[in-house]
Amino acid sequence: MTWRATALTLFPDMFPGPLGQSLAGRALEQGVWSVEARSLRDYGIGRHRVVDDTPFGGGAGMVMRPDVVSAAIRDVGRAGRPLVYPTPRGRPLRQDDVRRYAAGPGLVLLCGRYEGIDERVLEAEQVEQVSIGDYILSGGEMAALVLLDSCVRLIPGVMGSEASGTEESFSDGLLEYPHYTKPASWEGRDVPDILLSGHHAAIAGWRQTESETATRMRRPDLWAAHLARTGQDTGGPVSLAADPERLH
């Protein structure tokens, strides 16, 4: 069954964008997944297809109208697909969310513009609000493409290697270990000897240690969650002190 994405946007030409290239693009051509972009302007009010208005309470900018947005949402056959609104006000998008979305029939993505979307329609339509990071974009389309990319790559038949989807950052709650390839020596920097040893169990142990070290140093929030999940004692505050020898 084809995994279906529908984007509700003022700029439908932005889709599929970069997702029409590489492995995702090949899978799109093969019908493994699909994306339809619907223009919110088609549901606009009056001769000029107005989609926004000034905010109640004053303030700069414009707000997307609830009647316009709801008309677009209700015209889409969701068929069990989650309705997701990328916004800085949403909860942080996690890999667990991505796995859940990818395992389902697809997504309906609501792309905001201007100052955002009237809160009433978000409540009425039970929209999931997610954030891809603590920064501001010009609109929701780029965030929607990021979300789509994270999902599409997990759909069976898209990626070249099944292991690629599991042995990576966040797959087990940790950041991924560092990677190396040829040449074995480059500008005075050598590949760690253990990776050249052929000792697969030792390599697996080294990679696990590297993942734990990188997570502890760079993402104390993930490290604390890992310790709690595995039942380990945090031993006090998480240390961010770098140990250079562990990274080379």
Image: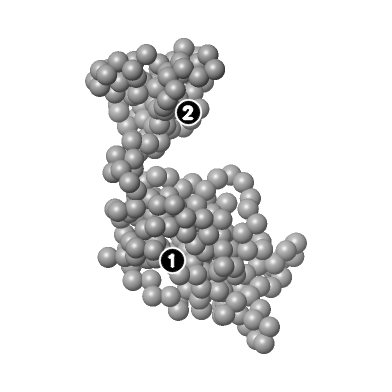
Q: Quadrant of residue 40?
A: bottom right
Q: Residue furthest front?
A: 183
In front: 37, or 194?
194
Say the numbered circle drawn on residue 85.
none
Q: Quadrant of residue 46?
A: bottom right
Residue 160 in the image: above or below residue 44: above
In this orientation, does residue 227 appear? yes
Under circle 1, the secondary element is: strand
Q: Position of residue 170 (x, y in %)?
A: 39, 37
Determine whether label 2 and label 1 are within 8 Å by CB.
no
- Please tell me how many numbered marks the rendered image carries: 2
* Residue depicted at x 27% and y 19%: 198
Residue neighbourhood size for the residue with mark 1, other residues' Cα within 10 Å, grouped as few (<14), some (14–19), many (≥20): some
Quadrant that contains the N terminus: bottom left
Q: Position of residue 215 (x, y in %)?
A: 44, 27
Say the numbered circle drawn on residue 220.
2
In this orientation, does residue 237 appear? no
Q: Quadrant of residue 111?
A: bottom right
Report, in whole angstroms, how far the alpha carbon at label 2 lies from the one at label 1: 36 Å
Under circle 2, the secondary element is: helix
Earlier in the chain: of badge 2 and badge 1, it is 1
Residue 32 in the image: above or below residue 221: below
In front: 135, or 118?
135
The amino acid sitting under disc 1 is Val
Residue 112 in the image: above or below residue 67: above
* Residue depicted at x 43% and y 75%: 76
Residue neighbourhood size for the residue with mark 2, other residues' Cα within 10 Å, grouped as few (<14), some (14–19), many (≥20): some
Say the numbered circle drawn on residue 35.
1
The amino acid sitting under disc 2 is Pro
